Amino acid sequence: MAGSTYGNIFKITTWGESHGKALGVVIDGCPAGINLSESDIQVFLNRRKPGQSSYTTQRNEDDQVEILSGTFEGKTTGTPISLIIYNKDHHSADYSQIADCYRPGHADFTFDSKYGFRDYRGGGRSSGRETAGRVAAGAVASKILSMLGIDILTYSKEIGGVKINDENFDRKEIYNNPVYMPDKAAAGIVEQQLKEKMAEKNSVGGIIECKISNVPAGIGEPVFDKLDACLAKAVMSIGAVKGVEIGDGFAAAASYGSTNNDGFSMQDGKLTKTSNHAGGILGGISDGSEIIIRAAIKPTPSIAQTQQTVNRQGENIDINIKGRHDPIIVPRAVVVVESMVAVTLTDLLFTAMTSKMERIIDFWKPENR
Amino acid sequence: MAGSTYGNIFKITTWGESHGKALGVVIDGCPAGINLSESDIQVFLNRRKPGQSSYTTQRNEDDQVEILSGTFEGKTTGTPISLIIYNKDHHSADYSQIADCYRPGHADFTFDSKYGFRDYRGGGRSSGRETAGRVAAGAVASKILSMLGIDILTYSKEIGGVKINDENFDRKEIYNNPVYMPDKAAAGIVEQQLKEKMAEKNSVGGIIECKISNVPAGIGEPVFDKLDACLAKAVMSIGAVKGVEIGDGFAAAASYGSTNNDGFSMQDGKLTKTSNHAGGILGGISDGSEIIIRAAIKPTPSIAQTQQTVNRQGENIDINIKGRHDPIIVPRAVVVVESMVAVTLTDLLFTAMTSKMERIIDFWKPENR
Amino acid sequence: MAGSTYGNIFKITTWGESHGKALGVVIDGCPAGINLSESDIQVFLNRRKPGQSSYTTQRNEDDQVEILSGTFEGKTTGTPISLIIYNKDHHSADYSQIADCYRPGHADFTFDSKYGFRDYRGGGRSSGRETAGRVAAGAVASKILSMLGIDILTYSKEIGGVKINDENFDRKEIYNNPVYMPDKAAAGIVEQQLKEKMAEKNSVGGIIECKISNVPAGIGEPVFDKLDACLAKAVMSIGAVKGVEIGDGFAAAASYGSTNNDGFSMQDGKLTKTSNHAGGILGGISDGSEIIIRAAIKPTPSIAQTQQTVNRQGENIDINIKGRHDPIIVPRAVVVVESMVAVTLTDLLFTAMTSKMERIIDFWKPENR
Amino acid sequence: MAGSTYGNIFKITTWGESHGKALGVVIDGCPAGINLSESDIQVFLNRRKPGQSSYTTQRNEDDQVEILSGTFEGKTTGTPISLIIYNKDHHSADYSQIADCYRPGHADFTFDSKYGFRDYRGGGRSSGRETAGRVAAGAVASKILSMLGIDILTYSKEIGGVKINDENFDRKEIYNNPVYMPDKAAAGIVEQQLKEKMAEKNSVGGIIECKISNVPAGIGEPVFDKLDACLAKAVMSIGAVKGVEIGDGFAAAASYGSTNNDGFSMQDGKLTKTSNHAGGILGGISDGSEIIIRAAIKPTPSIAQTQQTVNRQGENIDINIKGRHDPIIVPRAVVVVESMVAVTLTDLLFTAMTSKMERIIDFWKPENR
């Protein structure tokens, strides 16, 4: 359980440091027969690539993915898919400043505590750059889900305290603005605010929302591997996430049973819910309605203001982190959240195929093989 | 991954339905040499036992635990500890009402979708009664943690919208009131409100907070098995939990880097943090300061008001759930949250013992064995 | 990985000591909708029950199994099946002799080394009695396999050096003799030999063979979770097993490629093999022909002859193990091997359901759910 | 459980096909602070490299390993170590012959059955070339074990029916002959025989033996994760292995309790065994004496003689496999067996660090951290 492998049947293993030679992921348990090319994966990676707007780090990486194994003649073979992304920009930086001290809000101190020392180049393995492997795997999982008719929509719901207005919700707008908000007006206010915060050498956080539609009822395992529990782990494992909620989430804590319960009703011969406070999950199992999950992202810890800290020699020092950093990581984290959700859901969909003996018998009938 | 086993080195497997013969847990990977008796476990179980106040179900269960294996002459032997709790009250109820329909806010529909049918007696495996096994395991984990000097404090932070006032915080008060709040005044207001909601046949939710002190720095595995990610899964896997946050959690999303970052400072020769917005975890690894986690609990779904639903035959019906149910489950869930936190932390503490080669060499030196 | 949980999707957790209150197993991941009663399981347990012939220990246990959870109205519900077997005879013995010394061929010394002390009553968790839980789980797995048309045949192939003659092979004979041999003549010779060895206060070993027919081609995962690798672990984990082989096994090491390769041939429109030296597995994946596995069982270590050993105080002593022990454990181990094979195969059959994307799409089509 | 990840704490994930771009392994859970360079790993890879003698395939690969992540300034950091080996020779072959038919003794048919099609270039993932990743990981595990004073010795014990003579045993001889036998005379006979078999277009098999010395007593987890069970899986997962035995193995099945039991005795104040029929493992746990494991390797299935088979269209055909193949894979498999043993033992050594509470308390004492 060293921590870099995730999933049970659809299993991913990521590796690589921010300023090492390369980063990558091995996807094991991907079914055979899926058309898969590097461009399928590149689309996802481009959504988290640095340097796409003035609000993201200007590090020069094109994040080109290469498939090293697991496909043949354009199709997945069922064997491990090894994906690699070379770091172009890994020689350029000067790390002398951070090599010797503990940046506030970063994992420098905790890595030193755990391992005795650390790869201090750009945060090493604790860098946000680690998520490239997750996103590459997420692209493959998302392809599987789309072949099953499942659709995931993810976007910035709130940045620096500015929320989207649900009445303005426009799915097509998400990729039209650099903050990935489905509300043009809110995005405009956010952009203005980000400029101010950049001038102040400060940073902001926000909330990402993810909606998954067309998930069959019955996904998620009771007790410990509930769908919501697995999603919570998946999303909380992303570096800057400090909170996760499902459906009404924390608001449900202040609600009443009479309000929070979703009634059931037959509509055109189909069972539906009259509301969706539960966010599509009951008892840890999908109920067939839209699954809703939100993640709270903390403000980027790398800020250029003077901060108080301690060096490895145990002396109090002041630190001014140089270089340009993202004043907000929410937009780039959108595809990371989506990827972790996709990987988790794929794994649980596969797991759910053995819940009924009747269907197992049917699956293995000689005439069906 | 059928979902009833949790943990990697310290591993628990729970079983049992609300109205079956018994419930239990098997704890595997518990170290040898711990003094353990049934009374150690009973203390924890008594904290979630029904019938302790007028705000909890009046089901008559004394939840007496029995150790079936894994101890010898009062000490753990290193082999699986099997714990059983017999259901006394499992013959008494009349389930005809719920056998055939889907209660709003419950897992009746999702279990039927997943498995084709369900054990409808009191919710079967999706009942809150399932948590008895978790709590029994949590008692053992907590004993281990206390032997390592680690202390976990858990309580109701908010019920029905009424928050504790941090200025009134009194640890000793927690077990003095039936709602497990560390603030006598807030508890009084909550009790009054609960009486009103019971009269209205309604229910409320709330927030549980858990603080863990004296955890060594270095616990948690980078990337997917981060301490916060594992805690999020552990806590979200509890039936009624709809949200989890660490440190400032969702509030961090509206904060700034300059405010949210915790500085480091030397105090009496020890590295400390000047604040704890992060809740004791940086990069998914404990930093030695207090770990803070909160869980949002939805209002009890079982309410006696008329609700709209559907039966198994696909007909719209009205339902009035009979019997007395907890108008609030937050107080009884306090020990469940604490137990899941304890099990998770124990497992990750054990995992962290192999992070440095130097210490492994020292451990296995012939003179140290 | 504390060692008492086995399997990934179909997962079993056993617990209990030889002379504790009870033993048991929790089966998680068993599909819903299987008719299951205690008698289904009792049939398997009776095959390993002590006291069935003069060649087995006379310990008085009826090994009556009780289902504590996971079934409802006679059917499995998909939730954990908890099975318990109470130890009747656990108060009777006098352990003073073995409490303080290390019996040759037993795990007394290794348990003390690992855990610092041990439950010395009848071997505690290292007793052959531990296999009762495996067999109870094996009964459930076997029921699943038989619903899929898969048949497992297991028997004693060799005891005390006496082999069955393949020309005399008679399936029906297996349960007609107390040594579970499919060859009446060989069984007679073995019985005579056992009487002699009992008179000499000695014990013998033997070889168990297991043949599995009608397994679909395609079961087993490449590289580490090959079908043969998983079977090897499953069978080697049984206490007295010292060797495992598949197909021709060790004989293949002295064979030639031209002899050992099995040709392929079309027979009545079906692909078949012209021989089966491989034992039904190629590249770790079932090929549709009969799977053949053999286990070497060491002689019972408990013998009444004087043996040289050491006590816990580090003194050389002589030991004479009192009481009547099985002079041969092969016959009772037959059902244990069969159970471990059944559990392993069930788990890998479930795993193999996600190897082709085409079949996953078909499985989740709305009209098929 | 897709099969390419192995281990629990020290966890390896291999990927890559015989004629893809590259092969590799990700090692997760490797402790921090180990001096590790590519040359440490290259030594192991060179032991299995093709083209080293006239008895191995003449494929032109130098199997140069590159470390992509997980080390910094020459030391392991505790994060995943990604190792890659590029395939030089992957464009050269003509696969038209095997693309369409099922080679006897190979996994062509079973891969097609499982996945619907296969990467037929040189066997794809089922090629022996897959073991390069295992060996790279084994080099790292072996380095850890040697830092703990543990020594593994592996060699060919028998090839083509020719056994080493224990009286001639000479450890230094192993790498002096191309068949890795510790007996010069036997190696000479084997070489002569191999020339004859090559002339006959035939192949032979053999037995590999592995002896591990200085393993602390107490390694291995009771019941399912016994040391011998885990070793059996590890070794049986290697492509051509058909049997595994521990200590006396199959010979024990024909022995008697009085002969097979190893007595205990005090020697110079230390507990020792008077013999080692058990092969260093009792009840699945190491007893401190030498661990002995043997693997039966089948004859190379690729032979140039005409063989009977079937093509994908279901027609009976004759096949003559072209190209030069190893007439014996035993010598090259020696380091593969050693690697799998090293990985398994490392993982179980780490696991065993939590068996006694007393030592855990000691480990986590503030003064010891």
Image (spheres, coloured by chain):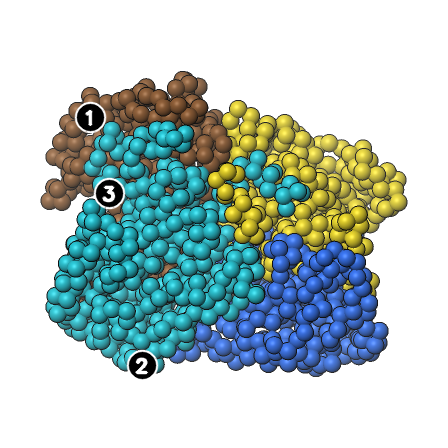
Chain colours: A blue, B yellow, C brown, D cyan
Question: Residue at (77%, 49%) from the top-left corner?
Answer: B269
- Could you tell me which secondary element the residue under label 1 belongs to? helix
Q: The N terminus of chain D appears in which quarter of the rendering? A: bottom left
Which residue is nearer to you in this view: C85 or A85? A85
Residue at 71% from the left image edge and 77% from the top image edge? A56
Q: Amino acid at mark 3?
A: Phe
Q: Position of residue B237 (x, y in %)?
A: 62, 50
Q: Is residue C181 visible?
A: no
Residue carrying label 2: D92
For residue B65, above or below residue A263 = above
Q: Are marks 1 and 3 in contact (CB under 8 Å)?
A: no
Q: Which residue is mark 1?
A: C197
**Residue A186 location (% of width, % of height):** 79, 75
| D142 up-or-down from D286: above or below | below
State the CA–CA distance, disc 1 to disc 2. Answer: 64 Å
Q: Earlier in the sequence, mark 3 or mark 2?
A: 2
The chain holding disc 2 is D
